[in-house]
Amino acid sequence: ELWWHKILAIKNVRSLFTRRILVVSREIKDRLVKVWRYPDSKVKVTYHGVDTAHYSPSLEVRNQIRQSLGIPETDLVFISTARLSEVKRLDRLIDAFDFLAKEHPNTWLLMVGGGALEKILSQQAQGKASKDRIKFFGLLLDVTPYLRASDVFVLPSDNEGLSLALLEAMSTGLICVSTDCTGSSEVITDGRNGYIVEKSVDGVLGALRKIMGLSLEARKNMTQTGVDFVRKNF
């Protein structure tokens, strides 16, 4: 169609006047080269970097934060650190957690972040049976203490480039769950250092249930695999 060829021509002209195009994931590069026909030699993948000394596990901080929140040491804590916007689809996570919480009363969900949907998501959570175990913290300058207090990070987005929050959580020693969006498969090897799921409540819930079924040793192995991966590659 004419509109497609017009857009394609604009993209091609733009690429002619650039020396280098930096992208944050291989999937974005593949899209530029295969769909928009950018020259492969001009497109370079430049991954985010993570301060792995800052984003690291701390048993002391874990215990302090949990004590301040009234969360028992042995309970399992899920967390999201994300902008509260439509594309992040945090409604999926709230729904999935509520189903899980009915089966497992020793679970909690921490929602860290601010955004346009803060009121809507808070109202959604208040309508759930698990509302007392879903906590909102708003926008924080440093999310590290709450990551350290948690066990599982969940990214239920419709779309990403390559999630820096995902890398930060993995570096902090959390098992990571992500919907199948751009970049996640470059971080998560499914079943090894986390889980990649379909973009649905059932997809997210399935991964949460798998994690609940893991032994403590299996969880520790998965988190250490993730920490080692980020330290080596990011």
Image (cartoon, grey):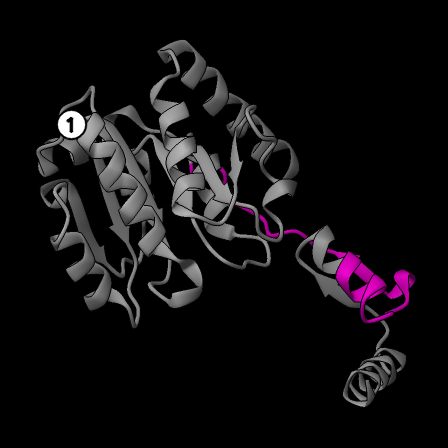
Q: Quadrant of the C terminus?
A: top right
Residue 6 is situated, as x and y percent measured from the top left of the image, at 81, 89
The magenta segment:
30-55
Q: Which residue is drawn at the image coordinates 37% and 29% (left, top)? A: 57
Q: How many marks?
A: 1
Q: Nearer the viewer, residue 53 or 73?
A: 73
Q: Nearer the viewer, residue 132 or 26?
A: 132
Q: Nearer the viewer, residue 176 or 50?
A: 176
Q: Quadrant of the N terminus?
A: bottom right
Q: Tell me where residue 86 sits by quadrant.
A: bottom left
Q: Is residue 70 left or right of residue 175?
A: left
Q: Which residue is drawn at the image coordinates 90% and 67% (left, top)? A: 39
Q: Which residue is mark 1?
A: 105
Q: What is the secondary structure assignment of the residue under circle 1?
A: loop
Residue 60 is situated, as x and y percent measured from the top left of the image, at 24, 26
Q: Tell me where residue 43 sits by quadrant.
A: bottom right
Residue 66 is situated, as x and y percent measured from the top left of the image, at 16, 32
Q: Is residue 218 left or right of residue 60?
A: right
Mark 1: few/some/many CA within 10 Å (<14, 14-19, 20+): few
Q: Which residue is drawn at the image coordinates 19% and 67% (left, top)? A: 119
36 drawn magenta? yes
Give the residue type that dot 1 points to. Pro
Q: Is residue 46 above or below residue 8?
A: above
Q: Is residue 215 above or below residue 197?
A: above
Asked whether residue 211 appears in the rendered view, the answer is: yes
Q: Is residue 49 left or right of residue 1?
A: left
Q: Which residue is drawn at the image coordinates 28% and 68% (left, top)? A: 117
